Amino acid sequence: MTVIKVKNLKKSFGNLEVLKDINADIQEKEVVCVIGPSGSGKSTFLRCLNRLEAITGGSVTINGHDITDPKVDINKVRQNVGMVFQQFNLFPHKTVVENITLGPIKALSMNKEEAIKKAHELLAKVGLQEKAGSYPGELSGGQKQRVAIARALAMNPKIMLFDEPTSALDPEMVGDVLEVMKQLAKEGMTMVVVTHEMGFAREVGDRVIFMDGGYIVEENKPAELFGNPQHERTKAFLSKVL
Amino acid sequence: MDTIVNALPYLLKGLQVTLYIFIIAIILGFILGLIMALMRLAPLKILNWIAKIFIDAIRGTPFLVQLFFIYFGVNSLSWISFNSTTAGIITVAINAGAYFAEIIRAGIQSIDKGQAEAARSVGLTNVQTMRYIILPQAFRRMLPTITNQSIISLKDTSLLSIIGIADLTQQGEIQASATFEAFKIWLTVGIIYFIIIYLLSLLASFLERRFELR
Ligand SMILES: Nc1ncnc2c1ncn2[C@@H]1O[C@H](COP(=O)(O)OP(=O)(O)O)[C@@H](O)[C@H]1O
Ligand SMILES: [Mg+2]
């Protein structure tokens, strides 16, 4: 089943056309890794998938809802699409548990006890039970990012978007976060992951999309794309990062 | 010393009036400032303009002129009438409101936009995002500037004596001319203002330290 359908997606910031014509179908339970040089539009593409950026042209359909349709309740759509940011974006004035329960309580009207119980389960899942009462300022980068993942999961999303989730981390923290993501993938979460972790893309990805200059230049199974890239630009990029 | 002891009850009665006006005006001013700041940042152009004109008009004119405009000007309209205390409260509230509006606007804009994005991405509405994520963080950051403006507003209330409000300054004037001890009386009045402002800044730094722990 196609859960994300992107057709002729265009996105401009003023005169700068960042996404030129993006087409992609993402299936349920698929893990798609997006790679490409800095500034190629990877983040913008991801952010268009939950309308953190307004789309300039084309369409994005999530679970059958065209999210550009003004009649669609975008808050409802976003509840089904979890997002994890490079800079974590935890709420610094709220404890770890409050970070996780805010969405379920305010957006899903879940009762508080239930939300807290769920938060503790999710913290156990990402290995941070003992940090429930801490503030984000007291956590390391890797711990923050795992809390951010738990926060997104608390909404029971059908899809998870990751924008370079390990790029802001010290190298020794990267493994813990990737481990949590691998586990999610194993459980069948549909994931779109912008990443520089080629090892992760190769191991966990079902498909790798290479973006450059606002286009999808090439996409394929990881083994194919890494082993036998078809386009010059893909080859040039891979030769720099592998 | 006798002069001061005899004058003190009157001065403290004046202080009561000063604090009464200050507290009501600062609360109203804060609410007004918050509304104006949100209007200033609203997507609707007309709201931006109304807020901007209000803020610029107040910040671009002297406090005394505002006071006279409200007490003598607005009050002279046939369909409206209020006493000097009300005029005083309105003026201090409007004046503080304009400055608060700019402080709050700057505070809101100083919060990283990733915060709003994270809140929206867990399904919060714009209003919920403002209420639970942006404003609480912005207020913590704004506390020192808000304290400053509140202290300025407290000092501004002394100008209200000009329209006959029996505040601390007015009582000082009465006592000074009744006792012919201007030096002692005005020194006492100054010390009373100083103590109140000192307590206000103590309260503010207590609040700041409380929030900083997070
Ligand atoms: N909000 C914005 N306003 C203007 N330009 C932007 C904005 N966001 C991104 N861009 C520009 O769009 C291009 C692609 O950015 P981005 O999607 O972040 O690339 P990537 O994630 O692949 O590094 C860059 O040139 C960037 O400067
Ligand atoms: Mg990026």
Image (tube, coloured by chain):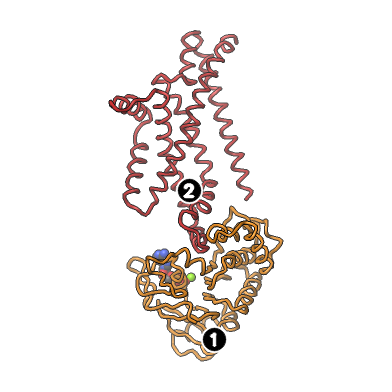
Name the quadrant containing residue A106: bottom right
Residue A31 makes an appearance in the image = no
Q: Position of residue A216 (x, y in %)?
A: 43, 81
Query: Which hue is chain A drawn in?
Result: orange
Mark 2 residue CB less than 8 A from any atom of ligand 1: no
Check residue A86 in the rendering and tell me which mark sits there, or answer none.
none
Q: Helix, strand, or loop for circle 2?
A: helix
- Local packing at callout 2 (Cα closer than 10 Å; few below 14, some 14-19, many 20+) is many
Q: Which residue is mark 2?
A: B107
Q: Spatial distance from mark 2 to mark 1, Cα to Cα?
A: 46 Å
Q: Give the chain letter at badge 1.
A: A
Query: Which hue is chain B drawn in?
Result: red
- The one nearer the camera, B26 or B198, is B26
- The one nearer the camera, A189 or B209, is A189
Q: Helix, strand, or loop for circle 1?
A: helix
How many discs mark residues in the rendered view? 2
Q: Position of residue B61 (x, y in %)?
A: 34, 34
Q: Which residue is mark 1?
A: A222
Residue B39 makes an appearance in the image = yes
Lateral position of residue B201 relative to residue A76, left or right: right
Lateral position of residue A26 relative to residue B198, left or right: left
Name the quadrant containing residue A103: bottom right
Looking at this view, name the residue that lies furthest to the left.
Answer: B78
Looking at this view, name the residue that lies furthest to the right.
Answer: A130
Q: Quadrant of ligand 1?
A: bottom left
Q: In the image, what residue occupies the spot 50% across and 78% down?
A: A34
Q: Is residue B95 above or below residue A60?
A: above
Q: In the image, what residue occupies the spot 59% across and 81% down?
A: A204
Q: Position of residue A168 (x, y in %)?
A: 57, 67
- Amino acid type at circle 1 is Pro
